[in-house]
Amino acid sequence: MATQDDLKRMAAHKALELVPHGEYIGVGTGSTVKYFIEALAASAKDIKGAVSTSSSTSALLRQHGIAEVGLNEVNGLALYVDGADEINHSLQMIKGGGGALLNEKIVASASRQFVCIADESKYVARLGKFPLPVEVIEHARSLVSRQLLKLGGEPELRIGVKTDNGHQIVDVSGLNLDQPMSMEDAINHIPGVVENGIFARRPADVLVLARAGGVELVYAK
Ligand SMILES: O=C[C@H](O)[C@H](O)[C@H](O)COP(=O)(O)O
C-alpha cells in the first residue's frame, strides 16, 4: 500500500509535467516540495532559476544544484509549486504548517500559475480542521491573540519558533472558515498580524492530487 510519502512523491513527479522550459519558477516549502526539488534536479527541465520561499528550500536548491534567484531580480514568475496543509474544492488553502506562509504568499502572488502538490489527506470539503498559522510581530502577540479569540478561534503560540522573517507564529484552532476570503482579510486587518495562512485571495490554479489509485489534476470548481 502506498504511504503518504509515496503519494507526496507521486504528486511532486507529476507536477514536473507542468513546469515550462526556460522560465523562472517559484518554489514553496515543506516535505512535498522537497520531493519536487529532487525530481526537478533529476529531470531535463532547463528552468532559468528558482525563487525560494524559505531558508530550508534555499538549502535544498543549493544541494541539488538549482540556481536561486531573488524575487527582486525577476519580472514575475511563470509558475509557483507548493504543498498545502489543507486544500478545498475551490483550491483555497491553509498553509504555514512549516512556518513559511509569508514568503509563500508573496512568491505565489508574483506567479502566473499556482500548482499545488498534495496527497489525498490534504484535500477537504471544508477548511479549518488544521489549525490556522498566523504570523505575528512578537510584541503584539497577546493583543493579536485576544482579537483572534473574538473571531472565534483558540490561539496557541508555536513555542520556540521564529520565522525566517523574525516573527512568531500563533496556531489558531476552531475558526469558522466557511468564508475563507473574509476571514483572510479580517485576520490580516488586526494590527500586529504580518500574514495568515489562508490562501483564498490567491488560491491554487491546479491541484496535483495523489491518491492510492493514481495522480489526477484537479481544477477549481
Ligand atoms: O509553511 C509551510 C508550507 O505552507 C507547506 O506548504 C505546508 O505546510 C505543507 O507542507 P508538507 O508538504 O510538508 O505537508
Image (tube, rainbow, N blue to C red):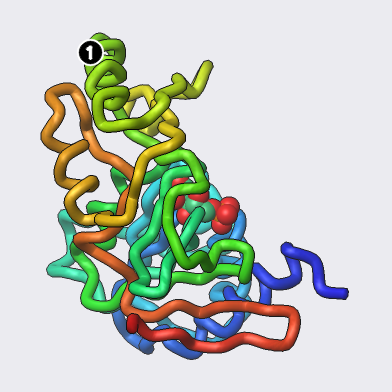
Inspect this view and state whether residue 11 appears. Answer: yes
* Along the line of sight, the residue nearer the viewer: 33 or 62: 33
Residue 77 x %, y %: 23, 71
> Who's the residue at 51% across and 71% down the image?
117
Pick the front one: 9 or 121: 121
Q: Residues within 10 Å of mark 1 (few under 14, many from 20)?
A: few
| x and y percentages locating residue 173 in the rendered image | 45, 34
The quadrant holding residue 119 is bottom right
Left or right for 169, reference 24? right
Q: What element carries label 1?
A: helix
Amino acid on which the number 1 mark rests in the picture:
Leu
Q: Residue at x 33, y 50 (%)?
A: 177
Is 52 placed above or below 169 here?
A: below
87 sits left or right of 188 in the view: right
Return the x and y of residue 101 as percentages of the image width and height.
36, 45
Q: Which residue is drawn at 12% across and 24% down?
A: 191
- Residue linked to disc 1: 143
Position of residue 45 relative to residue 125, above or below, is: below
**Residue 30 seen by the camera:** no
Residue at 27%, 62% (x, y): give it: 108
In the drawing, does residue 18 fall left or right of residue 76? right
Task: Residue 75: name its quadrant.
Answer: bottom left
Q: Would you identify the image quadrant in which residue 175 lies?
A: top left
Q: Quadrant of the N terminus?
A: bottom right
